[in-house]
Image: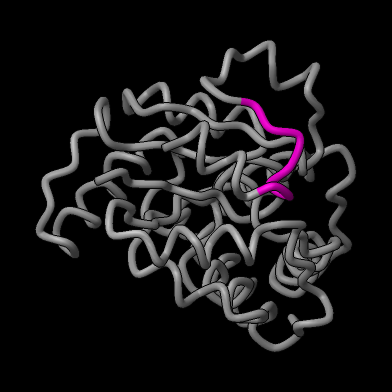
Amino acid sequence: MTLLLFDIDGTLVRVNGRGREAVNEALASLMEQPISVDGVTFSGRTDPAIVEAVLTHNGLSATDAVIEDVIATYVETMQNVLTPADVEVLPGVAELLAELHARPDVCLGLVTGNVEPIAYKKLSAHGLDQYFPVGAFGSDHAERNRLPELATQRAADHTGHAFQPTEHAVVVGDTAHDIECARAAGARAVAVCTGRYGRADLSQHDPDLLFDSLSEPSAFLRQTL
């Protein structure tokens, strides 16, 4: 059985800036001052790491307690403002997930920098949450490289199948961080050029497979499995 661990933003869906707005609002409300997120890269990073970077960028204290408070406010903000209209399912994703879900030789999971409530909020906007019973999230650890191993263990607990990352796990994502975290776990890395980075950028990090998009599910299935 193959364990496919998907990133969310830029891989499965695009949220069109709502996350940046919510982080900005959460920080501004707690710090009681204007906050700038200009120049801070969100792609491929965990939510706690993003919050820490924004706090540091604005010359503010980035203690664990402050980061936890900001994350809690950010989650509340996103739960209130995120609508299905804000979430765009990327081409081919719905068809691909339906096909993978139907296969007895595949288990689907998540490896995402989103904290868990926001991950499922984004996916549930168009019914994609049903495909992902397990995962590892930014709320589990701020260091993304720790997440594939945790997701693999949760998938094993869920299915009763002992997955070995070096033999059975594949991480699918749209940034160099996704490739790096796959390598850290000994898993295969599949990169897609549907986020902020193109083929030239991602190929430098030597993913095992590189797709321009997931718009052709049959090609993904054939090459990945």
Q: How is the image coloured?
A: one colour
Total marks drawn? 0
Relative vertical location of residue 113 with respect to residue 120 in this rendering, above or below: above
Residue pictured at 73% horizontal, 66% vertical: 89
Residue 64 placement, left or right of 14: left
Query: For residue 167, what is the image quadrant?
Result: top left
Residue 21 screen position, x and y as percent: 83, 66
Residue pictured at 46% horizontal, 45% vertical: 142
Query: For residue 197, what is the image quadrant?
Result: top right
Quarter of the picture holding the C terminus: top left
The segment highlighted magenta reads 210-216
Q: Is 154 in front, or is 217?
A: 217
Relative vertical location of residue 75 with respect to residue 24 in this rendering, above or below: below
Query: For residue 20, what is the image quadrant?
Result: bottom right
Residue pictured at 70% horizontal, 22% vertical: 202
Residue 176 placement, left or right of 183: right
Residue pictured at 68% horizontal, 36% vertical: 192
* In magenta stretch: residue 211: yes
Q: Main secondary structure of the magenta part?
A: loop
Residue 111 screen position, x and y as percent: 45, 49
Residue 169 placement, left or right of 154: right
Residue 108 screen position, x and y as percent: 39, 57
* In magenta stretch: residue 7: no
Q: Is 20 in front, or is 176?
A: 176
Relative vertical location of residue 81 with respect to residue 92 in this rendering, above or below: below
Residue 16 screen position, x and y as percent: 85, 62
